[in-house]
Amino acid sequence: MSVPAVTETTALALSRRPQLWLIPTILTGLLALLLSLLYMGGIVNPNADLRDLPIALVDDDIGQAPTGQQQNLGAQVTAAIAADPAGGKADWRPLTRAQAQDQLDSGKVYGALVIPAGFTDSVTALTTSGATRLPTITVLTNPGKGSLGSSLASQITTQAAHRASQSVGQQLTAAVGAQAGPTAKLLLADPVHVVTQVGHPIGTHSGLGLTAFYYTLLLVLAGFMGGNVISNGVDTALGYADNEIGPWHARRPTVPINRTQTLLLKMVMTAGITLISTALVMLACVAVLGMDASHLPLLWIYSYCAALAVGLGVQAINAAFGGVGQLVSMFVFIVLGLPSSGATVPLQAVPGFYRFLSHFEPMRQLSDGVRAILYFDARGDAGLTRSWIMIAVGTVLALLFGFAMTVYYDHKGHKRLTPQPT
């Protein structure tokens, strides 16, 4: 008895089936919409979203208060600035010079505004013949907090300094009265010179404070892509997925193994292979490209633990969600992580939704630690301690979630595939 030949269909015939279009169209459109809203929503208007950017406010003025006034000009200026925090955009922190420098060095503030010791004397001297120099106010930047964050802080402090200068100028003009000529009045209208300096310098090979973000992104991608490659490779090798390269297709005999043991194998392989991938990331960034980095042993250990935590999380998600696990882990580690990391746009300058995500999104936790190691002398209070804690928490959650799901599936008898004949 002859077997009838199977007639192959055509792409044109299949393209006329609406049900074939439905799911891909919905998913692709939904992904495009979500990605656009999430990414652009976090950076489209940082000035409008900016709230409570931490900036140090230092009053070193030791001059005597002008006649008839209770405070010297330094105290008056700092009090006025602190009382009008740029419409809520700045969180002014009155500190001593030493405290401000410590917070600049630990990345706790984005910049500082400093009133120098002789501010009152230099201002009052302008109304006399003994004036030798313009009074100054110093704006300190912190490029280790990222170019945009440092720029926003610099704008706020510079504007505050100019407002202070104009206020002082009004007092001087009123004090001199009609005695001042046109040139003197012009000088006194805005008498304070604003000087901008780097408060906490970083290396020239630090990408203007962006290498921490991109290095963190590399660690997340190494864990994410490595985890998925390992997961797919193990499934193919054990006969639970097809191996297709170009026109060649193969299917290995299925190895009898339950879900829990499969996950254990994938996690062990992730722990081993991540050693190599993170070493290569460091080799490329530091040795080949010359990225500024100190504390190299600590940076490598941190890099390994960070990428491993992501890789284990990917394995757990894939084990729990199956085929859509890669999409879920992409949203968890990358799509939601990038705009809520605070590494390019300060968290104080993003909408509240992203600030909420930043409390637990992995990329934010990892970027704080990388920034502390690269720019802030690996200080624990610069974010490194919290990062280590969150890496440990993330690793434990990945292990608990992944194995809890596979044990449950195995207990319920959910086999992955019917074994293929050898």
Image (cartoon, helix red, strand yellow):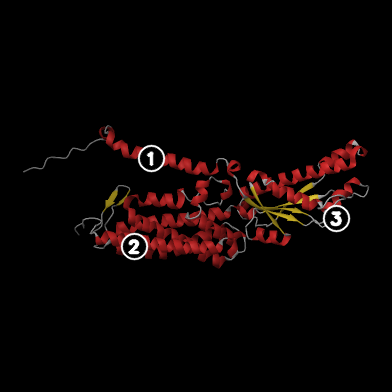
Asked if residue 344 lies left or right of residue 5, the reply is: right
Callout 2 secondary element: helix
Residues tagged 3 and 2 counted as in contact (Cβ below 8 A): no
Q: Quadrant of residue 186?
A: top right
Q: Is residue 50 in view?
A: yes
| Mark 3 residue crowding within 10 angstroms, few (<14) / some (14–19) / many (20+) | some
Q: Which label's residue is closer to the chain start, 3 or 1?
A: 1
**Callout 1: SS:** helix
Residue 292 higher or lower than 167, as above or below: below
Q: CA distance from mark 3 to mark 2?
A: 70 Å
Q: Is residue 74 left or right of residue 296?
A: right
Q: Residues within 10 Å of mark 2 (few under 14, many from 20)?
A: many
Residue type at numbered disc 3: Gln
Residue 381 in percent (x, y) is at: 59, 63
- Residue at the image position 26 percent from the left and 61 percent from the top: 410
Q: Earlier in the sequence, mark 1 or mark 2?
A: 1
Crowd tier of the residue under label 1, counting other residues whose Cα lies within 10 Å: few below 14, some 14–19, many 20 or above: few
Tell which tag, 1 or 2, sits nearer the viewer.
2
**Depth check: 356 or 275 in front?**
356
- The answer for how far apart the CA atoms under marks 1 and 2 are is 31 Å
Could you tell me which quadrant the N terminus lies in? top left
Q: Name the amino acid type tagged 2.
A: Phe
The residue mark sitting in front, 3 or 1, is 3
Left or right, 329 with reference to 280: left
* Lateral position of residue 152 relative to residue 137, left or right: left
Disc 1: which residue: 28
Locate residue 108: give its quadrant: bottom right
Instruction: Work out whether mark 3 precedes mark 2 in sequence or the reverse, and give the earlier one.
Output: 3
Residue closer to the observer: 355 or 368:
355
The residue lying at 86 percent from left, 40 percent from top is: 174
